[in-house]
Amino acid sequence: MMARGTRTNLATLAGAVGDHSPVDRPAASTTPTNVPLSELAPNPRNPRDHLGDLTDLVSITGTQLQPALVVTRGAYLTLYPEDEPNIGLARWVVINGCRRLAAADNFGRPTLDIVVKDEVAKNRVTLLAAAVIENVGRRDFDVIEEAKAVELMVAECGTAERAALKLAKSKGWVSQRRALLQLAPELQTALRKGELAIRTARSLAQVPPQAQVEAWKAERDQGHQAPDPDQDTTPGERKPDRTPVTAAKVTRTFRRLEANPATLAHALLDYLDEDGVRALLDILTSPRP
């Protein structure tokens, strides 16, 4: 503000109007947090073969509990220019949340909540790791899909050691998952169906491919296949002789881990689907008896 009695420089005055005026200046553009489905494309490099049954996400028509992680069109095409035909005219590419995108489209939700993070697309390894990490350990992500995703990470990173570091897994875990891809197609199918235990599959992967099926049949006939704690199963498929999980057992586990509330919350969000999170919130907010 100029002092009274001073002369006004016309050049200074001219510089304070028009595009330089502090009055009526257009607001800075903001990143949207909710966009139409037509502006979103699923990740063409999604490590999942299939999105699976989407009925567990039907509640997305009313509430979306977690936003989808997306990168801008430009950031994605910088890494994969050859994928332009696959993303069409979309402004954003969904990296984490492709099932949420498909469920929204399937059940009639017109928009999706998003978080834009182009730093995820700083290089191919980081982008692939973000997609793989979201799915590893999920109940609906079968172990062969997981093994293929790990193989992609190793190819992109150059070594199994680098892939393990990026996935926050041990080198042994990476090697075990990759070994499953050495199984005969018949055994991979059996593994996906839960008919073949992961522990047994690891051993069979060391057998020459032409002898694997016969070795499995012999193993099965001898009744040496014990229930495998590594094999993911849905609640309806769990073996009846498995010791039931009780609240007391889970509490003891939490105490041993000395997990803080934030860690527990993130773990539960990773483990539960949207319906499960909704049920958990209902329980937590209900008056305790």
Image (cartoon, rainbow, N blue to C red):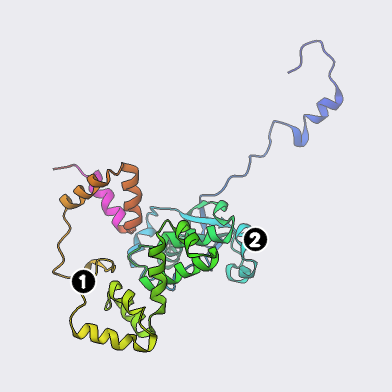
Q: Secondary structure at mark 1?
A: loop
The amino acid type of the residue labelled 1 equals Pro
The amino acid sitting under disc 2 is Thr
Q: Is residue 21 magenta?
A: no
Whether residue 200 is situated above or below residue 170 in the rendered picture: below
Could you tell me which residue is drawn at 81 percent across and 26 percent down? Answer: 13
Counting other residues with Cα less than 10 Å from the Cα at mark 1, is it few (<14), some (14-19), or many (20 or more)?
some
Of badges 2 and 1, nearer the viewer stands 1
Q: Is residue 247 left or right of residue 9?
A: left
Q: Secondary structure at mark 2?
A: helix
The residue positioned 50% from the left and 66% from the top of the image is: 154
Looking at this view, is 112 or 109 the one in front? 112
Task: Locate residue 135: give its quadrant.
Answer: bottom left
For marks 2 and 1 on the same chain, the one whose residue lies earlier in the sequence: 2
Can residue 51 be seen? no
Q: Quadrant of residue 1?
A: top right
Tell me where the magenta segment starts and ends, as one range: 276-287
* Residue 201, x across and y down, in percent: 32, 76
Which residue occupies 28% across, 78% down? 196
Give the image quarter of residue 18: top right
Residue 140: where, in percent of width, then height?
34, 67
- Check disc 1 and report the residue beneath it: 227
Where does the image place residue 251, in percent across and percent down from the top left? Answer: 20, 48
Q: Nearer the viewer, residue 225 or 34?
A: 225
Residue occupying the point 18% across, 70% down = 239
